[in-house]
Amino acid sequence: GQQLNQSPQSMFIQEGEDVSMNCTSSSIFNTWLWYKQDPGEGPVLLIALYKAGELTSNGRLTAQFGITRKDSFLNISASIPSDVGIYFCAGQLYAGGTSYGKLTFGQGTILTVHP
Amino acid sequence: SAVISQKPSRDICQRGTSLTIQCQVDSQVTMMFWYRQQPGQSLTLIATANQGSEATYESGFVIDKFPISRPNLTFSTLTVSNMSPEDSSIYLCSVAPGQLDYGYTFGSGTRLTVV
């Protein structure tokens, strides 16, 4: 089956630093999603990407859908303590409308931000 | 996006018993999904729950162990049957996007500990 390789597994950074994480796949996806999970909570959607090459921002977050459709990255600029959590990428084979595809998740990146 | 209420939020259960987890959505949705997140791990899809038909299970998950009900378009249950300590995980329900450009929404999860 499809597998997503997400890296790094964990990051320890100082407040104010920029962060970058990425996901690569052995097969293509139509959609890439980035989620954040706080302790005791379910994942919350940060950014959704629907087109190869697409670059999308959400505040201090920027994500890109790779041209090959097999990879995506997420950048967080000027990190703050509340950025702490686990970040997951997820790939989906179908995009848009009422059609759907199963989500395949990466292993997650644990982010720790030191004040 | 949809708001999901999941119950219970956590439980400690004896091995050999069963637990039913409920997922209530504030709007009608076509597709509902159940995921398992083992300690320190990523999310793995258990099954897709369709209203009015049998759930579709992923490889490694069977109906006898994880029976699912989907009586209407806003509600689903997942039962973890004949539990063992290996079933200790977070169980999450999710709904598919009903409109373009919305990712899947997750409930806050049920943290299950089997002793």
Image (spheres, rainbow, N blue to C red):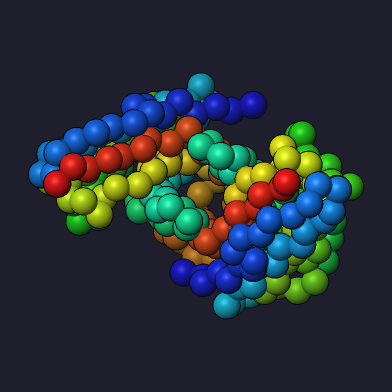
Instruction: Give the x, y percent position of residue A75.
Output: 23, 40
Location of residue A71 (image quadrant): top left
Q: Answer above or below: position of B53 versus B16.
A: below
Q: Answer above or below: position of A19 versus A68.
A: below
Q: Does residue B46 show up?
A: no
Residue at the spot x=78%, y=52% of the render? B14
Q: Does residue B102 appear left or right of residue A103 in this picture?
A: left
Question: Most extreme residue toward the top, as rendered?
Answer: A26
Q: Does residue A105 appear left or right of residue A77 in this picture?
A: right
Q: Does residue B47 show up?
A: yes
Residue at the spot x=42%, y=56% of the render? A44
Instruction: Give the x, y percent position of residue A56.
Output: 27, 48
Location of residue B44 (image quadrant): top right
The N terminus of chain A appears in which quarter of the rendering?
Answer: top right
Q: Does residue B17 appear left or right of residue B36 in this picture?
A: right
- Between B61 and B31, the residue placed more toward the observer is B61
Instruction: Give the x, y percent position of residue B45.
Output: 65, 44
Q: Answer above or below: position of A1 versus B113.
A: above
Question: Most extreme residue toward the bottom, as rendered?
Answer: B26
Instruction: Give the x, y percent position of residue A61.
Output: 23, 48
Residue at the spot x=63%, y=45% of the render? B89
Q: How many marks?
A: 0
- Between A33 and A99, the residue placed more toward the observer is A33
Residue at the spot x=59%, y=77% of the render? B27
